[in-house]
Image (cartoon, rainbow, N blue to C red):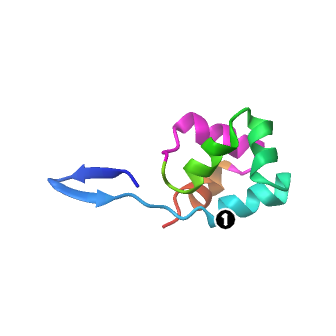
Amino acid sequence: MKNNILYGRRYEMSFRYNKLRGRIVEMFGSQAEFARKIGQSEQIITAKLAGKSSFTQDNIIAWSEALDIDQNDIGSYFFAR
């Protein structure tokens, strides 16, 4: 996990991606197939879902579009704690 500094203290920003993983399997059958669809490697997908790599705004938009996630539901998929 990536450590961030807030007000002089270190904290870990960790999110749960269970709902996102479920949506990937529901829509594409596997992370590998999803990776092919969005033009990224399966390793990148795995790293993001494991919290070892951060999502950019562009990632969130691309993934949401590919997974048909409504804008109002993005938080429940990408920012669940």
Question: Which quarter of the figure has residue 50?
Answer: bottom right
Identify the residue at horizontal 58%, vertical 34% (top origin): 58
Residue under the point 56% across and 49% down: 48
Q: Residue 1: percent from the left, percent from the top?
A: 41, 55
Instruction: Give the side of residue 30 with respect to residue 77, left or right.
Output: right
Amino acid type shown at disc 1: Lys
Quadrant housing residue 17? bottom right
Residues 68 and 45: in front is 45
Q: Position of residue 51 (x, y in %)?
A: 50, 54
**Circle 1 residue:** 19
Q: What SS does tag 1 mark?
A: helix
Measuring from the top left, give residue 8's x and y in whole percent. 14, 53
| Residue 25 visible from this viewpoint | yes
- Would residue 68 be visible to someone looking at this image? no
Q: For the point 83% across and 54% down, which residue is it?
A: 27
Magenta highlight range: 53-70
Count of numbered badges drawn on the protein: 1
Mark 1, other Cα within 10 Å: few <14 / some 14–19 / many ≥20 = few
Relative height, residue 22 to residue 74 (above, below): below
Q: Nearer the viewer, residue 23 or 34?
A: 34
> Along the horizontal axis of the image, is 4 left or right of 14?
left
Q: Position of residue 28 (x, y in %)?
A: 84, 51
Residue at the front extreme, as displayed: 43
Position of residue 18 in the picture relative to residue 22 (left or right): left
Q: Is residue 23 magenta?
A: no
